[in-house]
Image: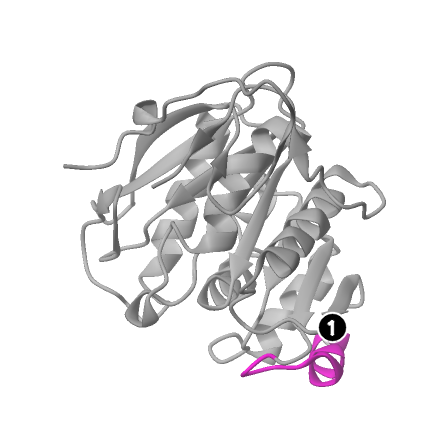
Amino acid sequence: MAFDPAEYVFSTPAQPEAIRAATVLPAHRENIELVTADGLTLVGELALPASGPIRATLITLHPLPTHGGFMDSHVFRKASYRLPALAGIAVLRFNTRGTSSPRGTSDGAFAEGIGERADVLAAVEYAVARGLPNRWLVGWSFGTELVLKYGAQAPVAGAVEGAVLLSPPLHRATDEDLARWGASGKPMSVLVPEFDDYLQPVAAAHRFALVPQAKVVGVDGAKHLWVGEKYASRALSEITATVLGTAVEPLAAEWAGPVAAAQ
């Protein structure tokens, strides 16, 4: 049975609690389905602020599903747990074609980043149809390839403000894709771990020179998978600052109010 976010049980501690890896803060969460142009149904979740305006929307694209990537890859899962409450940010997560998670399995099969173009479009169209504002593509690893290949092409380009990339390997994305993003003028923030397995900060700065507006940020000590609360929190702080157009500040580390714990 697919996981239902309504199953979270919230309680209100007497004192503020530290936000940990499994801490779930209040939000309106719902299971969603996306339908692609080639007729596939993709499963996902939308987390919206429980109160107040939606200040920005993250359309997340997960790491490589053939190597364990899915909508619950930990940085994106933590984004959905925290950012609606801490920053008023909506988080849309979904499994690309053929990918499974506790939410369920999306139709189809992995398509080497080619068929997934329709997945990107379906997610963006869903966000537009729901009236979600200030839409940003946020890719991690394989997800960055999808952002780079398809995010600056119509019709997606006209529906998003820009992009945030975590650990771009630049395996499938080409210089032509980078140049297209450069020509679009759309903002891009590129977070590159110091010890990334595929592309490290100096090399990333060279490759992303084709995107003059890209901000390449080397993250000392981090690795490709952003393991550890220190690095996950840094990624979420950078994402928040980019999509809200603010200075980078650490997100709150404590929460006074209802909390739940993920299993």
Tell me if residue 65 can be seen.
yes
**Left or right for 116, reference 59:** left
Going 43% across and 57% down the picture, which residue do you hit? 62
Q: Which residue is mark 1?
A: 220
57 is higher (above) or lower (below) than 88: below
Extreme residue toward the front, this view: 14
- Image quadrant in which you'd find residue 82: top right
Residue 165 locus on image (x, y percent):
61, 61
Residue placed most toward the observer, 79 or 125 = 79
Q: Camera-side residue: 78 or 144? A: 78
Magenta span: helix, strand or loop, mainly?
helix
Residue at image point 38% right, 67% down: 64
Image coordinates for residue 2, horizontal then vertical, percent? 20, 37
Is 129 a magenta residue? no
User: Seen from this angle, which residue lies furthest left?
Assistant: 1
User: What residue span does the magenta drawing correspond to?
Assistant: 196-209
Q: How far across and down, in percent of the image, does residue 76 sit?
A: 49, 49
Instruction: Tell whether 244 sits left or right of 232.
Output: right
The quadrant holding residue 241 is: top right
Question: Where the C terminus falls, by quadrant?
Answer: top left
222 versus 132 height, above or below: below
Q: Position of residue 44 (x, y in %)?
A: 33, 40
Q: Could you say whether the residue bearing mark 1 is in a helix, strand or loop?
A: loop
Q: Quadrant of residue 207?
A: bottom right
Residue type at tag 1: Asp
